[in-house]
Image: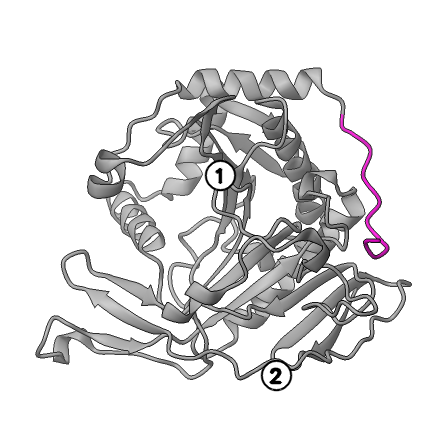
Amino acid sequence: MTRVAGGTLADGREILYYDHDGAPERAGVDTRPLGERPSGSELRYDPLLDVWVVVAAYRQDRTYFPDPADCPLCPSRPGHPSEIPATDYGVAVLENRFPSLRGEKRSTVDLAECSSPLVRRAGAGRCEVVCFSPDHDASLVDLDEGQVALVVDAWVDRTRRLGELPSVEQVFCFENRGAEIGVTLQHPHGQIYAYPFVTPRTERMLSSVGAYGRRTGRNLFDDVLAAERADGSRVVLESDTWTAFVPHAARWPYEVHLYPRRRVPDLVALDEGERAGLVTAYRDLLRRFDGLFGGRTPYMSGWHQAPVRRGREELALHLELFTSRRSADKMKFLASSESGMDAVTNDVLPEQAAARLRDLGERSAPPEGRATGGARP
């Protein structure tokens, strides 16, 4: 069982500690002289693309490549207080000090009643940081199954709790790893964004699923998963509860989608067996990604979940994992065609990418998990 304990940082932000039953109680007082929390986030509407853009100018001052000795996500130690007041932890979740979104009050605008196309509203919502381990030099792939299960439990709990906030329409759990991706804190961590709107990618998926259902009477996610499993050429791994495959129309050189075999709307809906299967499958995929180029592969990993109030019967929970590297010494940059026109060109045949990832799984035995407890010296 997972135990959750809460606390408050010096500027009023919430911090939560996730531990297995039997672990020591986490304690600590944040003694840092923090100033007032930043404010001023807003949403600006783009009427040409029908999307909301988040503007949070104060994020220019956020922490940027600190010295490892001053890492804000390591446990606090004498003379070096951090974002984590405790001297050790299992998994820690805290409100972001420099959030893109902040505020629990529901913020809505009726666009039909706006006389101008230039519309803005408050940037309500919440942004959290998920610290995977107290070990500064670890990565999620290094952690043992018990520690990864603790991370999954934190994702599930935060998805549930954030979805209860009146300002939140969708919850997105994600991780960026590697400086090439844009990561500025090297401690193993991910983030959670609780948006006050349904994201553009999800809106497009819901539109496609709706059109497909009206045309065929079936669910598009179910049919895509069934077709990929039947074809088999892009399947990377399968278990009793999960299937991972390179999409038929992959946008990135190495991109994998991980689906539960049973369609569910979000992480909260997974049963105990599916959570256990997720831990095994996800660690397996991350090991394969690290085998692609002989070292730490930069990647982005994010959970597509159904919105809080829409599409919960239609949208299927799935993970999207991809790297911006197309070879050991070459990056895939989204230049003018991709960034300016959303017209993507992939440099690697999806079937070849899947074959390579399958082969990496067959040739590499799972490494032993690293130590996951104890503060960094």
Residue pointed to by mark 2: 12
Picture residue at 48% right of the left edge, 35% below the top: 322
Name the kind of residue labelled 2 in the image: Gly
Picture residue at 17% right of the left edge, 74% below the top: 111
Which quarter of the picture shows residue 306? bottom left
Q: Is 319 on the left or on the right of 167, as rendered?
A: right
> Is any atom of residue 161 visible in this view?
yes
Q: Is residue 82 above or below residue 265?
A: below
Query: Is residue 357 on the magenta stretch?
Result: no
Picture residue at 20% right of the left edge, 60% below the top: 50
Residue pointed to by mark 1: 180
Q: Is 35 on the left or on the right of 276, as rendered?
A: left
Which quarter of the picture shows residue 290? top right
Q: Is residue 90 above or below residue 115?
A: above
Q: Are marks 2 and 1 in contact (CB under 8 Å)?
A: no
Q: Residues within 10 Å of mark 2 (few under 14, many from 20)?
A: few
Residue 257 in percent (x, y) is at: 49, 36
**Magenta span of residues:** 366-377
Q: Is 63 on the left or on the right of 339, as rendered?
A: right
Count of labels in the image: 2
Q: CA distance from mark 2 to mark 1?
A: 33 Å
Name the kind of residue labelled 1 in the image: Glu
